[in-house]
Image (cartoon, rainbow, N blue to C red):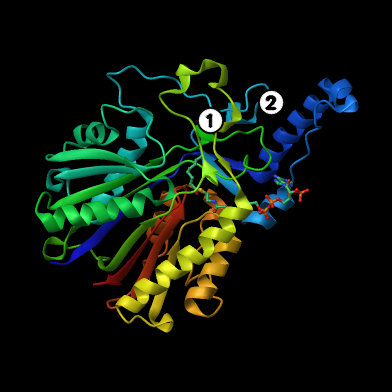
Amino acid sequence: MSVVISGTGLFTPSEKISNDELVQCFNQYVERFNADNNAAITEGTIDALSYSSSEFIEKASGIKSRYVMAKDDILNIDIMHPTLIERPNDELSIQAEIGVAAAKQALKAANKTAADIDLVIVACAYTQRSYPAMAIEIQDALGCNGWGFDMLVACSAATFGIINAANAIRSGTAKTVLVINPEILSPQINYRDRDSHFIFGDVATAVVIEDQSTATSEHCFKIIAEQPITQFSNNIRSNIGYMNNCHPENANADDKYFIQQGRKVFKEVLPMVSELITSQMAKIDLAPDDVKRLYLHQANINMNGFIAKKVLGRIPSLIEAPIILDEYANTSSAGCIIALHKHHDDLASGDKMVLCSFGAGYSACCLILEHL
Ligand code: CO8
């Protein structure tokens, strides 16, 4: 049995923030903080905050802008956080809504309807609640049969989700699966922290996974190799969770937001991912020159350049190793799926592609795909 990705979908929020807008707000906040704390800063009891800069952000990461669900209050220096109106329980949740939008596109691309789907997996970095599962809400909203569940693997959620979908098809517990990645990341950003205020954006992606024998779409990608790996690390961490109100004194502390040791992550993840991709290519005797496309996790343009060079032995063109993080920023697990969604129209039968995620956990996953 061969399992294929037969359709992809992408929901992009309508609101966008440029580096300059983000930096302008952050720097106004820094100016006010330093003025308000002038005495303590002069005494040496508080450190002055440093300014952010668009030049740094673009050079260090490649990010130029990000889409968000609610822009206004992120850029309000008295708030610096997205404000989303809480919906009543009988209305579709916001995370389910963007998941449904991406899923509908993926279904259309795969020539499928909701009635064909018998498993919905929501795979992302955060779900807005623990239960009922976002996947079951989306299953209901779309009118799919079968079953659904949520799974969290930070930036590797989408690829781990695809592997779970493939295994469900192989085991016979599902025939056609939707894997949906509604990544609403802006609430987890500390917009007052210059090390991380620029990193993430909001988005949703979706893919349809099915047996090759039922696939009819124009662009079908057969999974010909796959391997997930994990290795514990505290270098990317967030302590947000349902136990936070058990220690209310720290409930809003900085460690409840996304925190990382970016340099360490860069250094440690790079060899881990290069080795993972190389070993998967060796498993199926795939030579670097035969890799038509490298869809990498979209966290940092320099990191992707290093990995691509190590794996392919050459600096790839932007067509071979597409970059979407310049426009979308880091969208956690959705990043490599956006790259696949936007950059596959020119692929032809027999072309081989690498789809690889990496991120918190650490977690990484490499899939090698062949265009039918
Ligand atoms: N403006 C100006 N200067 C800055 C800024 C800024 N905004 N930020 C930091 N600096 C300063 C630093 O303070 C430092 O100053 P000094 O040398 O005086 O100490 C200097 O610039 C250099 O800082 P860094 O060493 O931190 O800069 P880097 O070149 O390492 O770049 C990056 C920082 C861009 C963060 C880089 O390290 C990076 O991208 N690393 C890879 C990280 C990565 O891939 N992480 C994976 C992310 S995890 C994930 O994708 C999913 C997690 C789950 C979702 C979470 C949702 C919220």
Residue that appears at 25% across and 35% down: 138
Disc 1 beta carbon < 8 A from ligand 1?
Answer: no
| Residue 77 disc label | 2
Q: Are marks 2 and 1 in contact (CB under 8 Å)?
A: no
Q: Depth check: give the residue in front, 81 or 107.
A: 81
Q: In the visual, does 44 lie left or right of 190? A: right
> Disc 2 to disc 1, how far (Cα)?
20 Å
Q: Is residue 177 above or below residue 251?
A: below
Please state the horizontal and vertical placement of residue 26, each as a whole percent of the image.
Answer: 71, 34
User: Tag 1, which secondary structure?
Assistant: helix
* Picture disc at residue 78: none
Dot 2 or dot 1: first in sequence order is 2
Q: Position of residue 6 (x, y in %)?
A: 24, 60
The type of residue carrying mark 1 is: Lys
Residue at mark 1: 256
Asked if residue 170 is positioned above or below residue 197 in the image, the reply reads: below
From where the camera sits, is residue 145 visible?
yes
Q: Residue at x 16, y 36 (%)?
A: 143
Residue 300 appears anywhere in the view: no
| Amino acid beneath label 2 | Ile
